[in-house]
Image (tube, coloured by chain):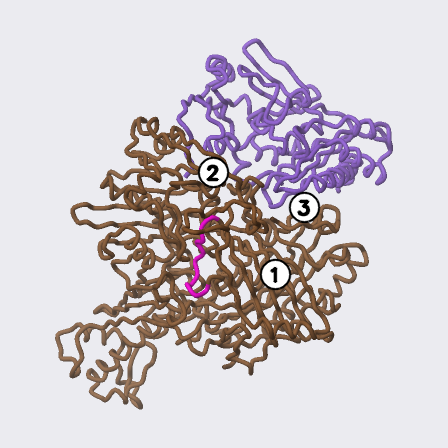
Amino acid sequence: MQVPAPFEYERATSVEHAIALRERLGEEARFIAGGHSLLPMMKLRLANPEYLIDINDLSELFHISEESGEIRIGAMTRHRDLLDSELLAEHFPIFRDAERVIADPVVRNRGTLGGSLCQADPSEDLSAVCTAVDASCVIRSTSGERVVSMSDFHVGPYETAVGDAEMLTEIRIPLKAHAGSAYEKVERRAGDWAVVSAGAAVWMDGDVIADGRVGLAAVGPNTTSIGPVSDALRGVAPSEDLYRRVGEIAAANCSPQTDQRGTAAYKSHLALELTRRSLRRAVARAQGQEA
Amino acid sequence: MTTTEPSPEAVEEERPIGFGRLLRKEDPRLIRGMGKFVDDIQLPGMLHLAILRSPMAHARIVSIDTSAAQALPKVVAVITGADLAEKGLAWMPTLSNDVQAVLATDKVRFQHQEVAFVVAEDRYSARDALELIDVEYERLDPVIDVRTALDADVPVIRDDLEGKTDNHIFDWETGDEAATDAVFDSADVVVSEEIIYPRVHPAPMETCGCIADFERVAGKLTLWCTSQAPHAHRTVYALVTGLPEHKIRLIAPDIGGGFGNKVPIYPGYVCAIVASLVIGKPVKWMEDRTENLVSTGFARDYVMKADIAATKEGKILAVRTDVLADHGAFNGVAAPVKYPAGFFGVFTGSYDLEAAYAKMTAVYTNKAPGGVAYACSFRITEAVYLVERIVDCLAYELGMDPAELRLKNLLKPEQFPYSTKTGWVYDSGNYEPALRKAMEMAGYDELRREQAEKRERGELMGIGVSFFTEAVGAGPRKDMDILGLGMADGCELRIHPTGKAVIRLSVKSQGQGHETTFAQIVAEEIGIPPEDIEVLEGDTDNTPFGLGTYGSRSTPVSGAAAALVTRKVRDKAQIIASGMLEVSVADLEWNKGSFSVKGDPSKSVTIQDIAMRAHGAGDLPEGIEGGLEAQICYNPENLTYPFGAYICVVDVDPGTAVVKVRRFIAVDDCGTQINPMIIEGQVHGGLTDGVGMATMQMIAFDEDGNCLSGSLMDYLIPTALEVPDWETGYTVTPSPHHPIGAKGIGESATVGSPPAVVNAIVDALKPYGVRHADMPLTPSRVWEAMQGNHTPPI
């Protein structure tokens, strides 16, 4: 049995309480949400926080709602609830695509959206999803709230814009007409981290793509969106040729490393192939054809 | 010898008194979480042991400072290799007559090697103290690539061995080299391929561990231990520690999977024993998941150059191989002493060859020691993979269907018992019906048609065939021993006065269902219902001596012992019955549970009546002692040779190279079936293992010798989502020398399935001109093969 180093533990009773604790305890303190990244790291003693602030009682962080032309998702929303949400499935089926291939039911019952994003693992699926759908992140501190884009949120591998005395509280996704989204992942085994995955979202204007975004996981230090991909998609009618061309742009704009999951060459190939597949499906969905 | 289909009556009978489908007696306990595993055991005053492991693969130990660790509250002791050396316990024998460091004294030879241990009042404190031990290492170049281990300029790993100047362990050969070369020289077709079976790990759900409890007053050590071989281990501990053997009691409680991982003696066990001897309190050591994966017995790790010779019509003439075997830092292979390469000699497979030859060189590398098993029947996994892969390469070159090529070359039933060109005597076999049955279940011809159509459309579908012959049930004591202990098994049966029974075995289930299977063997022989028969095993003070459970040997060896000891009891029962019925022994007939007078069935006594009489007050026939019990020690005259035909169907996504195992048809023949349900479970597990090895598993290292597979995130275990609904079928060809005709089944599927899966994937890639690709065939490795730049997994 792997056992963690000693730590102190407190269960926060409100977001303000949690942030105040974090402000007082500093960088040796960590929030614990679902615990499916932090606890294994603590057991392996790769993470040795002195204090754990448990935020599982903070009911204001559990929600999926439509408000002010946005989908708003509380940071403590569990994978399981993202998977089950009809609201999300209606507007952004990419979430259901992704949640079906994230870990296993046991992990999905505990793991959270905010925990996933804050872990900022370059292979993490929901970061790619949020990047694709152009989500923004609400970060709160004692002095108030700020809202950052996904590209500002991700600073580097395992590093985010959330400061020591701050908390990610909500994800907001703008609702725009004629949207379609999809997620494609290659894994060595069900529940494994992605070898590569690609999320795509498009917003149609008649027969052309008004806007489109692709988020890739496991092909570089983080999952920020690829500007040239969106440039290539905007104002263009969808076609197989376009998907391939955009796939090539995606492949050219990532920097995968060879590891046990695959060679860099294979991952670049997957960046192309999965970008192509996710775009094809996203467009079909935007056009009302389930693919 | 005849081959039959499994008896349908046996399948339908709900609670057979004897052989047949029967729910496992152990399952109510295990599935309710009421099993008792080593880590469930808590003893008063018990201390906890944790091991400090080397971060480097090869380094000299300059100094170790334990003072800070010793000063930590709740820490009882901190022990280094130097401390053990003072007691002469720094080194221990391996199962292959090598030695292995219990704790490193001079240098570390693989990453995660044991360097020191802490004993503390709780697990957390023990683990905390490890971080306070300060070890200074002087890095040495590691030897990681097995292909360079014998180069002139590489470091000598085992400089502890006197006079050792290289990393060579042994050379081994089998077969007739000259005769084989001659056949190759004149053959129409010769096909060669380098075939690698990468290092994999048994990865049982329960990791290894023990509790050592030395009672000073009694001078007795009780060791609760995750052991597949309790009696053999007790003897080794007696030799290592100097404790008299009768003062060691080893108890293997419920075990959560072994697969060979719990055959070797690990340093952690010895550390716990030493700690308890010194401290005089019970000491528990349980590995964590990482420790299990990175330091305990791995399996395979063979680089095999294979050649096959055939006529242009497809008659296979000879197989030849040259193997480079990576044994890690200490030679810890578990195999009978005369078989350093295990039973790899059966690489001639299921075919009628004119000649065969294998040579092998085994070397040390800076990797974890072992080479134990993993459900491989002593290296038969490698042997079968070699021959079944090279036969497929031959089919590729000849443009022949791989099933047809096999049918043309399989041994014929009239050739049994068959002596192979490497000296193995296959006891019984009827191969063609098994392969035909698998092909029929698969709809083989239809699958080939579907494949042809799909290829036209650019879709990738593959059909893989494998046929294997296993050699299990080690073994005849004239040939086989482990550290001088012959591989015969004792067995004791006692019938209680009321006709209930207890059978005591030397083997030890790790999940195989012994409590059910062995009760059924006794039930079949003496007619007592299985639920009335207690099966005891795993406690050396309460069971007879024998070599344990691995290599699919429980049914072939202890199963035979159980049948024979029951017959011995039944013979005595017959004499007592003759007294009860007042007729001669010859006038009685046996009706599975009772003796009756021939020609007068109304005059009969049940085995329960006889048991009461045996223990009762009345007179017994002249010369018969009271009681109804017996014991024997069974020495098998040969191994048993189960076989099977497997067909795998895969689909490969041409865009992502992701493999989907769509179907898997397995026809097994393990001779007489005791419990078809348990057999099916064994087959399902083994097939799942095979899919794992073929498509996702490998213990990998980087060039510095860092193990890259130290968690189940990195070392993948297949789940229900990676495997199809298994389609199983059986034929029954009894073993002629086993008392009930049974053969082993535990490892058949693990042995037979990897080549079927790989053959299927390679078959799917035929349009890309792929003839061979090495495991693990992850999407990336499949894609590389499609690009024509497949690299070996080293």
Q: Dot 1 lies on which element?
A: helix
Provide the residue designation for mark 1.
B755
Is tag 2's residue or tag 3's residue first in the polypeptide sequence?
2
Corner quadrant of residue B67: top left
Provide the residue designation for mark 3.
B780
Neighbour tally class for label 2: few under 14, some 14-19, many 20 plus, Cα within 10 Å: many
For the stretch drawn in magenta, what is the main secondary structure? loop
**Whether marks 2 and 3 lie on the same chain:** yes
Is tag 3's residue or tag 1's residue first in the polypeptide sequence?
1
Q: Dot 2 lies on which element?
A: strand
Is tag 1's residue or tag 2's residue first in the polypeptide sequence?
2
Corner quadrant of residue B432: bottom right
Q: Are marks 2 and 3 in contact (CB under 8 Å)?
A: no
Q: Disc 1 vs disc 2: which is toward the camera?
A: 2
Subunit of label 3 = B
Where residue B500 sits: x, y (%)?
A: 27, 67
Neighbour tally class for label 1: few under 14, some 14-19, many 20 plus, Cα within 10 Å: many
**Vertical relation: B339 (above or below) B75:** below
> Is residue B620 left or right of A221 when viewed as pictured?
left
Q: Amino acid at mark 2?
A: Ala
Where residue B583 sits: x, y (%)?
A: 22, 88
Count of marks, rendered view: 3
Subunit of label 1 = B
Q: Dot 3 lies on which element?
A: helix
- The label number, if any, that marks residue B59 in the structure image: 2
Residue displayed at 47% across by 12% down: A24
